[in-house]
Image (spheres, coloured by chain):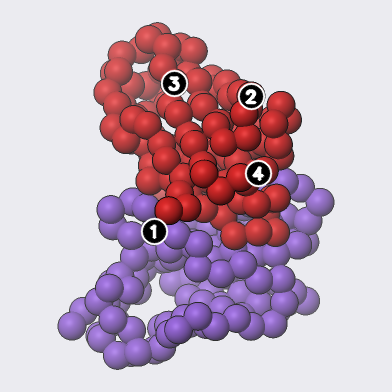
């Protein structure tokens, strides 16, 4: 089944404890992206990747890192999480970019205490 | 002013009603996506269009590039259509989507 998976789905952590949210797709997609969703603000892009080893900042990249060493994986790294990073995170992928259908992962609800 | 405005923000309907959700944007775009987010949180792509009209089952999406406006219509609405509908234009010459804050639709039996 074609899908985007994210892990973990739920995470409660404390300020400053490094964490990684994994994202994997099995559709051989070139484009992958991370978004955060906050009440009243909608979805905002954190980072995106056009292909392996090619990443770029979105609108809200501060406090986040990403890597794209393999085509299928696009992990989101929070080196020192802070409470303002409490949010619902979505990974998405598409064949080549934003002219193609976007496939979203199930979301990761992160709480930073 | 937001680059993407959706209206209405909230919408309630009786089962069977015809629904229209509007999206206006202020930037030049290459294409526009309509997304559906169910109460459980998952997001599904409904349409991607750059001109004219597309139809999938009871859903119809239209776009007028000159007027910078798109509409999503649901014919014969059903309680399972209850969700948040999000308009997301792809800004021209960028690799980014600009998201509206969504229209929350509730359809009652």
Q: Colour of chain B?
A: purple
> From this viewpoint, which residue is outermost toward the front?
A1
Task: Tell me which chain the residue with mark 3 is part of.
Answer: A
List the residue tagged with mark 1: B37
When the figure is inspected, residue A19 is found, relative to residue A54, above or below; the finding is above
Task: Tell me residue A112's x, y (percent).
Answer: 33, 21
When the figure is inspected, residue B36 is found, relative to residue B77, above or below; the finding is above
Q: Are marks 3 and 4 in contact (CB under 8 Å)?
A: no
Viewer-nearest of discs 4 and 2: 2
Task: Tell me which chain the residue with mark 2 is part of.
Answer: A
Along the viewing direction, whichever of B91 and A84 lies nearer the viewer: B91
Q: CA distance from mark 4 to mark 2?
A: 13 Å
Q: Which chain is red?
A: A
Task: Tell me residue B58's x, y (percent).
Answer: 43, 85
List the residue tagged with mark 2: A69
Residue B92 placement: quadrant:
bottom right
Marks 1/4 same chain = no
Instruction: Bin the neighbour count of mark 4 within 10 Å (Cα to Cα): few under 14, some 14-19, many 20 and up.
Output: many
Q: CA distance from mark 2 to mark 3?
A: 15 Å
């Amino acid at each position: 089944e074609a899908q985007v998976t994210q892990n973990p789905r739920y995470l409660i952590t404390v300020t400053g404890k490094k964490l990684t949210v994994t994202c994997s797709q099995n559709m051989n997609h070139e484009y992958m992206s991370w978004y955060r969703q906050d009440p009243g603000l909608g979805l905002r892009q954190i980072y995106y990747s056009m292909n392996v080893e090619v990443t770029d900042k979105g609108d809200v990249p501060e406090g986040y890192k990403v890597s794209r060493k393999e085509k299928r994986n696009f992990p989101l790294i929070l080196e020192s999480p802070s409470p303002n990073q409490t949010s619902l995170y979505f990974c998405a992928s598409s064949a080549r970019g934003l002219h193609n259908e976007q496939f979203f992962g199930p979301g990761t609800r992160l709480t930073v205490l | 002013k937001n680059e993407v405005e959706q209206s209405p923000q909230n919408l309630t309907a009786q089962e069977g009603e015809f629904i229209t959700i509007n999206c206006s944007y202020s930037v030049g775009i290459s294409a526009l996506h309509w997304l559906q987010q169910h109460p459980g949180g998952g997001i599904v792509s409904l349409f991607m269009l750059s001109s004219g009209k597309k139809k999938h089952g009871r859903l119809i999406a239209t776009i007028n590039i000159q007027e910078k406006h798109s509409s999503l219509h649901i014919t014969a609405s059903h309680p399972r259509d209850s969700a948040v509908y999000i308009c997301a234009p792809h800004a021209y010459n960028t690799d980014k989507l600009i998201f509206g804050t969504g229209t929350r639709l509730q359809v009652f039996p």
